[in-house]
């Protein structure tokens, strides 16, 4: 096969264009990049066979790199007390373009890229962008489209002195365009350049020989049928395609060309059928538009009936309230008039004063008897004052909770679609919220809509936010800190939806999530502690060393705590992190400590000191608590044997029960600026214990283990986290 044939392995598309079977102006939708929605620029072929601009791949990978790094805290000191050094800065795009680029040092050396065309994650391999082929055929078609769109715009000569002349030909070897005079000057007869390949004016230059991206000095001469991509002979001999079935480039060219030509001829032959189906689709669109308007009218009618019922009930309720109000006001007015009569020169008192002026005894006695009874009654009412009516309208408060709930679930007929159920055990909130649900008729639902809203303390009804989901789980981001959120989900089958699921209430952490790993250098004792490769899990094992020290226990020897800290320090702001202590753990201490205190612990081990007199030993003798300051440079609480031990407080108001069941996950909230640390039960986001801490130095997450035990840091919830757990 000739070199020209090797370069044009997909040249059959261009031949069809040349034959005039396809108009270049009618294929614009095929020349649009799915990422930037513009014409392709230097398109690359992804492993899923979709194409995307070279610059778009870089930008998307850069966005993924930034989103992954955002899990860490912006207000953190990136150095441990001793040996941790900050990483040197480098250009991110160059780093992404280099072979072997990866998101972080803890994952395999591969690059996962979300294809915007098929919306699936594809593996770019160890070489990343450098392992992708450039789609020269597509690039040529795009160039022809650009020329057709700008027919009046000429391509100018690249070598002319200003002003440049219009070019007449382009050299594929020099990758430049020339006018007639410049072409003669730079490609004189009798020289090597005279043999260069030239074409009509173009701005699209591609290599004459397609080279292998894996082996840059080898040219492409075979086609891998499994991976559906061209390869070189080294790829087949000892590379990634050694066990794959390959064929020659000429055979692949012929086979693919025949298949595509037959498919195109078939589609062209079915042109009448396609036009008929287009007409049918247009009729269906009109019918859909009419049916949609009719459905809207019916919905408006139903809601208007509801409005009428509500208006009628509203008028009835308001009339009842007005009647009760009028009756009460009348009673109050009568009572006011009676009391006004008790005032001097008014009413009863004035009348009694006039009666006292009567000098005839018989007449006085006749009138005074009845008057005395009235005055006595008024006097008794003054002694026991009681309003004639109540001012409260508590009995007239309209209870709409049930109706509000029913109206909130108002939807279309479910037509047998079951209600999805949110899985509370698999749903949680950390830096983001992860919501999982189960649907008995999963295969019958086309999609789901996840709704969530913030619950205010004053119970103000916030609007629901909606997210359309294709699967049965979703990561929800951008939630406010220290807030309650309600989540619910409903299933959709076409335009029909199920009722909403029961709401799940989750409480977000009180501060941004602080991301760190265990430091394997500063104070790490590899004889007692076992750290995994990802540095997010540490285990302490009571091994052979403790058995050797057993005889010393009889003479007052005590095993010391093995400390391990986070690899990032905190110098300001509010931070929250969470972890799990394994149920089999004997003694684990968790909390925060300052850099100077850590230096003291690490450089001054207390192997021969009794833990009874060590403040942070975890033994509750009581003597060590007596000397606690109100603010100290560290705070550690003891966890172990499935219990959470609340330390004694220097103040008198201690909790009644200082031994609590160990939470499944424990959270720590550090407010550096206010010098306060709190310990949380992550399952219910409930504060178990808090106290002041001296934050005059850099603070670090601190852990200590004795005997058998294990600590697992909570993994931040991201889209990658969701994909991983779905695969599991």
Image (spheres, rainbow, N blue to C red):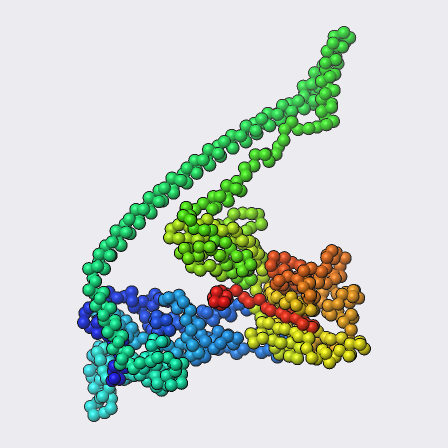
Q: Nearer the viewer, residue 172 or 436?
A: 436
Is residue 596 visible in the rendered structure shown here? no
Residue 416 in percent (x, y) is at 42, 49
Residue 617 in percent (x, y) is at 73, 70
Q: Nearer the viewer, residue 170 or 131?
A: 131
Q: Quadrant of the N terminus?
A: bottom left
Q: Residue furthest bottom?
A: 190
Q: Residue furthest left?
A: 19
Residue 152 left/right relative to 354: left
Residue 724 left/right relative to 336: left
Quadrant hosting residue 73:
bottom right
Residue at 60% over, 73% down:
518
Q: Residue 481, relative to residue 456: is it above or below?
A: below
Residue at 75% over, 59% down:
651
Q: Residue 620, relative to residue 294: is it above or below?
A: below
Q: Residue furthest right?
A: 555
Residue 276 in percent (x, y) is at 22, 56
Is residue 304 visible in the rendered structure shown here? yes
Q: Residue 378, relative to residue 304: is it above or below?
A: above
Residue at 39% over, 72% down:
57
Residue at 41% over, 75% down:
124
Residue 366 in percent (x, y) is at 74, 9
Residue 671 left/right relative to 414: right
Q: How many marks?
A: 0
Quadrant hosting residue 639:
bottom right
């Amino acid at each position: 096969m000739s070199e020209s044939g090797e370069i044009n392995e997909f040249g059959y598309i261009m031949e069809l264009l040349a034959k005039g079977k396809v108009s270049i102006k009618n294929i614009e939708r095929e020349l649009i990049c799915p990422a930037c929605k513009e014409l392709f620029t230097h398109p690359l072929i992804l492993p899923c066979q979709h194409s995307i601009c070279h610059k778009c791949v870089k930008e998307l990978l850069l966005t993924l790199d930034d989103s992954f790094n955002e899990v860490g805290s912006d207000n953190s000191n990136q150095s441990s007390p001793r040996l941790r050094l900050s990483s040197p800065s480098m250009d991110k795009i160059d780093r992404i373009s280099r072979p072997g680029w990866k998101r972080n040092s803890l994952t395999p050396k591969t690059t996962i890229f979300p294809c915007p065309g098929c919306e699936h994650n594809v593996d770019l391999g160890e070489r990343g962008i450098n392992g992708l082929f450039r789609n020269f055929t597509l690039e040529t078609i795009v160039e022809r489209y650009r020329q057709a769109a700008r027919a009046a715009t000429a391509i100018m000569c690249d070598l002319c002195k200003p002003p440049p002349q219009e070019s007449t030909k382009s050299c594929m070897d020099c990758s430049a365009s020339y006018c007639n005079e410049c072409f003669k000057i730079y490609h004189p007869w009798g020289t090597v350049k005279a043999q260069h390949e030239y074409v009509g004016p173009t701005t699209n230059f591609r290599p004459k020989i397609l080279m292998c991206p894996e082996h840059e000095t080898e040219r492409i001469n075979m086609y891998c049928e499994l991976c559906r991509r061209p390869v070189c002979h080294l790829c087949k001999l000892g590379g990634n395609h050694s066990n794959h079935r390959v064929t020659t480039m000429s055979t692949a060219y012929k086979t693919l060309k025949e298949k595509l030509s037959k498919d195109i001829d078939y589609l062209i032959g079915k042109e009448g059928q396609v036009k008929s189906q287009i007409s049918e689709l247009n009729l269906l669109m009109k019918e859909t538009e009419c049916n949609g308007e009719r459905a809207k009218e019916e919905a408006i009618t139903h809601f208007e009936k509801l409005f009428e019922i509500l208006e009628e009930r509203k008028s009835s309720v308001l009339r009842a309230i007005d009647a009760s109000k009028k009756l009460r006001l009348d009673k109050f007015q009568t009572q006011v008039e009676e009391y006004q009569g008790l005032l001097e020169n008014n009413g009863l008192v004035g009348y009694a004063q006039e009666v006292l002026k009567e000098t005839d005894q018989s007449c006085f006695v006749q009138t005074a008897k009845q008057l005395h009874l009235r005055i006595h009654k008024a006097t008794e009412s003054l002694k026991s004052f009681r309003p004639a009516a109540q001012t409260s309208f508590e009995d007239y408060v309209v209870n709409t909770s049930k109706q509000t709930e029913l109206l909130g679930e108002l939807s279309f007929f479910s037509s047998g679609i079951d209600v999805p159920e949110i899985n509370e055990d698999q749903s949680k909130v950390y830096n983001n919220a992860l919501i999982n649900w189960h649907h008995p008729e999963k295969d019958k639902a086309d999609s789901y809509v996840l709704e969530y809203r913030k619950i205010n303390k004053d119970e103000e009804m916030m609007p629901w936010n909606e997210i359309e989901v294709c699967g049965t789980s979703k990561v929800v981001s951008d939630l406010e800190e220290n807030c309650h959120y309600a989540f619910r989900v409903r299933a959709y089958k076409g335009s029909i939806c199920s009722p909403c699921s029961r709401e799940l209430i989750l409480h977000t952490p009180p501060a941004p999530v602080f991301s760190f790993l265990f430091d394997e250098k500063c104070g790490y004792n590899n004889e007692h502690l076992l750290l995994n490769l990802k540095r997010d899990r540490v285990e302490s094992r009571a091994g052979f060393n403790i058995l050797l020290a057993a005889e010393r226990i009889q003479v007052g020897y005590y095993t010391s705590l093995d400390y391990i800290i986070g690899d990032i320090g905190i110098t300001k702001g509010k931070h929250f992190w969470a972890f799990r202590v394994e149920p089999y753990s004997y003694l684990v201490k968790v909390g925060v400590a300052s850099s100077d205190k850590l230096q003291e612990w690490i450089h001054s081990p207390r192997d021969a000191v009794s833990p009874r007199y060590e403040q942070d030993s975890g033994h509750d003798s009581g003597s060590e608590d007596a000397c606690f300051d109100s603010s100290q440079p560290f705070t550690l609480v003891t966890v172990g044997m499935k219990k959470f031990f609340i330390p004694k407080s220097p103040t008198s108001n201690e909790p009644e029960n200082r031994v609590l069941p160990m939470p499944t996950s424990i959270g720590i909230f550090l407010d550096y600026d206010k010098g306060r640390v709190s310990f949380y039960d992550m399952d219910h986001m409930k504060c178990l214990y808090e106290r002041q801490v001296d934050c005059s130095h850099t603070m670090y997450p601190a852990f200590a283990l004795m005997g058998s035990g294990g600590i697992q840091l909570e993994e931040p919830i991201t889209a990658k986290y969701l994909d991983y757990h779905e695969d599991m």
